[in-house]
Amino acid sequence: MNLSFRTLLPFLFVLVLLIGVTIGLRLSPASTGKPALFATAEGSRLEEILGYIDYNYVDTLNTDALMRSLVKEYLDRDEVIEDIFKRLDPHSGYIPAINLQSETESLQGNFEGIGIEFNIIRDTILVVSPISGGPSESLGIRSGDRIVEVGDSVVAGVGISEDQVRNLLRGPKGTTVKIAVRRNGDKELLPFKIVRDQIPLYSLDVAYMVDERIGYLKLNRFSATTVEEFGAALDKLKGQGMKSLILDLRGNPGGYLIAATRLTDELLAGKKMIVYTEGKTARREEFMSGNQGRFEQGDIVLLIDEGSASASEIVAGALQDHKRAAVVGRRSFGKGLVQEIFSLNDSSAIRLTVARYYTPNGRCIQRPYDNGVDAYYEEYEERLEAIGQEGGAGEASKPDYGILPNYVIPLDTTEDRKAFYRLYNSGQLQRFAYDLYGRDQARIQAYASVSAYQQDYAISPEQWDRFVNRVAASNLLPDAAQRTRIRPWIETAIKAQVARQAWKNEGFYPVFHGIDPDFQKAYDLLRSGEARNLIK
């Protein structure tokens, strides 16, 4: 009798679970007749998750396969939850209660800490990027740095969690934390002493006038404050005479859908479709323009690349479909899914895809994810590698996802350009610029404006020799002929980093854009009037 019961237990479990999911969350565990497993908080959490997925998820699932997976692993419920979300799309996931605040804080408010975005890769804390305006950026911490020590403790190769990293690096404003990072090209660890500060989470990196008619505006995300920042920047530029705009969404991963639609409304005249969303159970919802926008006339070039995703693609798709802007750059990421966060009773939550979004012409730009989450990101990495090898010239022939620009700018994959970026990404150039600013601060601060600095300040022969000697040990510039060819790029990049110390982003971008080929093409298209021809 006992043997027969054990044999039937998995099938009984499936049956009871199916009934529980069908009923939903209206009944308490005690009233559903569930086995003891589901009379626990863990069982209730699983039931909540499955209930939300069953009703709200954008795709129709093979529920039987999902249940079989759950039965197989039901004694280890954390693995069950992980398995459930592996069967969904790459942007759905489980959020433990301890991580819920950090999940949303990048899109609202601010926090106190050292100001970095990070991931844990192969048991190492990898700096994804320093947050603009934060103390880490001002000290020269760079994307790609690997944090090896915090205080007196080694944090690499010890199984540290994201929550432990946050606890170590965040803290009250004014307190100090010491870290040591390993950087490509440097044999020794680089020490930094960082004073924690209030970390601003601005959407706007910079807005400035390129010339007397053309303005430039760069956004890094779509957050709760984006539309207000964007509107204020437009007003400032228009007050300085702006007639045409370069809107830079390169590397912008997205954010709030409503921020994207409200921002687009600032640029579209009349009542027009911006985007619509629709899911399996989510009714079609249309987002229209109609408010009086701040910049409804005047030419626009919108810069995107493979890092532009989600809300960035909503803006690009709407402006492209309505022929309001010439989209320039490289094909965007391809994220056409809409997520909502559903809170669970144990204070954790799930981020669940509930709908797809479509551009005004009905395009869904989502990249396929039929082969699973791992394959989804592997395909993206392969695409990045291919762009680097092909220079992006074959972008138009890629599968139909993402936003394909009206004008594709291939990557410059010459050996000279690769050598420059290897040097730039090593961080040695930035550190030299910080030292140079310290030595030359009085002279630099004497300039009345960024434009005066840009025109008159030059790296002296003695400073150039000092830089070459500094990087000699890293073997980053071994070829003298190549070093001579790329010297103008290097000197411009050093000048840009020095300007960042004096004027923050308002100093950095105007100088660095002198060696930014995407920016240069956007500027040329506007100045020549060719941007208008791209969208006729």
Image: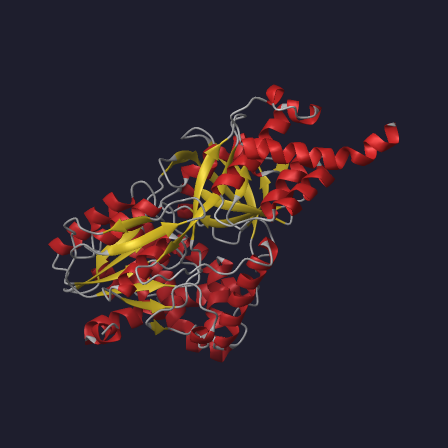
Q: Nearer the viewer, residue 11 or 355?
A: 11
Q: Is residue 420 above or below residue 427?
A: below
Q: At which x and y percent is residue 1?
A: 88, 28
Displayed quadrant of residue 512: bottom left
Displayed quadrant of residue 275: bottom left
Q: At which x and y percent is residue 290?
A: 18, 50
Q: Residue at x 82, y 36 (%)?
A: 7
Extreme residue toward the top, this view: 30
Q: Residue at x 60, y 55 (%)?
A: 372
Extreme residue toward the bottom, this view: 481
Residue 207 visible in the snapshot:
yes
Q: Nearer the viewer, residue 375 or 358?
A: 358
Q: Residue at x 21, y 52 (%)?
A: 289
Quarter of the image containing the C terminus? bottom left
Q: Is residue 228 above or below residue 488?
A: above
- Give left or right: position of 533 versus 82: left
User: What colouring style does the render use?
Assistant: secondary structure
Count of marks placed on residues: 0
- Give left or right: position of 368 versus 264: right
Q: At which x and y percent is residue 115?
A: 43, 41
Q: Residue at x 48, y 60 (%)?
A: 367
Residue 219 visible in the snapshot:
no
Q: At which x and y percent is residue 228?
A: 23, 43
